């Protein structure tokens, strides 16, 4: 199972990388993603999670749009539960509520996770399936499968603990019945390479600054001038967005011993 998931990710990565000279690439402005989390420790390593995140696209700064609440272009509230069957295997579900402009989307997700030791590091794999609904015209309902792998190490530093971590995620849209009118898509539509440095200040408080390099993959249509001459041919298009984030997490232990818990990184 571990080899299967890793091979699937490597396949997705190879398909996502530019394959021809026809691939066009555009880099957009920095995005800022602050997130506040509250985690309730349950029996074993199980937990309940409530998270609130804002997304600011700096390209839109200066805009006076009434839809930018507190300067955020997108807002997300999510709740989740995860159960650990063994030390290495766990599964759970999340429910997200996303607000973008005047669009509101409910996003349920099911996930399966595996974590094991790889030498001095912890190697993690997370496979998930989510559905967005309802589907306004500007935000189509869709099924998305995601695979994420990561490497991390917890380093005690006095009373603190540092948690350097590197993760890579790829996602693809799943269409069970494709209409003839639907446009073609690339197999991988989105990837994210993220590096972070978690810092545990106490058993109940930690924060994680991080940086990610996110890319959306699509097939663009040909562009023409007023005379109908093709100025930009159809082909692959990669939209790149650098992201800086900060996760702040409060853990409610309810009398539990923090040293015996296997707590996940803030990127659940």
Image: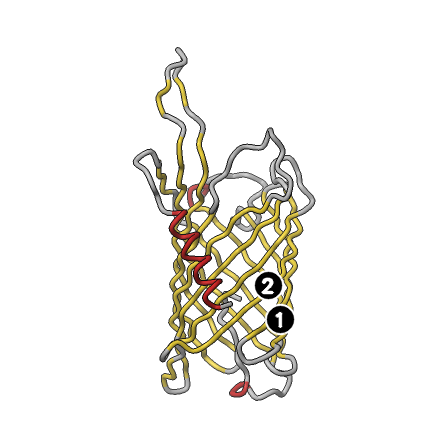
Q: Quadrant of residue 130?
A: bottom right
Q: Foreground: 85 or 43?
A: 85
Q: CA distance from mark 1 to mark 2?
A: 9 Å
Q: Is residue 3 left or right of residue 23?
A: right
Instruction: Give the residue displayed 60% in from the left and 30% down from the top.
Output: 180
Q: Foreground: 252 or 140?
A: 140
166 versus 236 height, above or below: below
136 versus 266 height, above or below: above
Q: Are marks 1 and 2 in contact (CB under 8 Å)?
A: yes
The dot on residue 170 is: none
Q: Helix, strand, or loop for circle 1?
A: strand
Q: Quadrant of residue 112?
A: bottom right
Percent of width and height locating residue 17: 36, 47
Q: Which residue is mark 2?
A: 111
Instruction: Give the residue displayed 57% in from the left and 50% down from the top.
Output: 144
Q: Foreground: 264 or 170?
A: 170
54 versus 207 height, above or below: above
Percent of width and height locating residue 52: 58, 60
> Of discs 1 and 2, which sits in the foreground?
2
Percent of width and height locating residue 106: 67, 51
Q: Residue furthest right?
A: 134
Q: Residue furthest left?
A: 21
Q: Helix, strand, or loop for circle 2?
A: strand
Q: Quadrant of residue 50?
A: bottom right
168 versus 134 height, above or below: below
Instruction: Give the residue displayed 46% in from the left and 57% down from the top.
Output: 8
Q: Which residue is mark 1?
A: 82
Percent of width and height locating residue 203: 51, 82
Instruction: Give the residue displayed 63% in from the left and 67% down from the top.
Output: 92
Of labels 1 and 2, earlier in sequence is 1
Q: Residues within 10 Å of mark 2 (few under 14, many from 20)?
A: some
């Amino acid at each position: 199972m571990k080899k299967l998931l890793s091979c699937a990710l490597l396949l997705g990565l190879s398909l996502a990388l530019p394959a021809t000279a026809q691939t066009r690439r555009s880099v957009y402005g920095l995005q800022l993603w602050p997130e506040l989390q509250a985690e309730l420790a349950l029996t074993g390593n199980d937990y309940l999670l409530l998270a609130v995140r804002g997304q600011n696209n700096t390209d839109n700064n200066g805009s006076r749009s009434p839809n930018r609440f507190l300067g955020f272009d997108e807002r997300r509230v999510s709740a989740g539960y995860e159960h650990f069957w063994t030390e290495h295997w766990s599964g759970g579900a999340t429910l997200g509520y996303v607000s973008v402009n005047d669009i509101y989307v409910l996003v349920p997700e099911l996930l399966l996770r595996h974590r094991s030791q790889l030498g001095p590091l912890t190697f993690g794999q997370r496979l998930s399936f989510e559905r967005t609904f309802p589907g306004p015209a500007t935000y189509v309902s869709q099924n998305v499968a995601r695979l994420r792998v990561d490497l991390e190490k917890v380093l005690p530093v006095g009373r603190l603990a540092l948690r350097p971590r590197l993760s890579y995620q790829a996602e693809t849209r799943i269409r069970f019945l494709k209409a003839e009118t639907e446009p073609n898509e690339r197999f991988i539509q989105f990837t994210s390479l993220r590096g972070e440095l978690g810092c545990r200040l106490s058993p109940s408080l930690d924060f994680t600054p991080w940086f990610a390099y996110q890319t959306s993959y699509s097939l663009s249509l040909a562009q023409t001038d007023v005379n109908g001459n093709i100025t930009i041919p159809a082909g692959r298009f990669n939209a790149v967005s650098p992201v800086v984030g900060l996760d702040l997490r409060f853990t409610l232990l309810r009398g539990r011993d923090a040293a015996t818990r296997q707590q996940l990184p803030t990127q659940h």
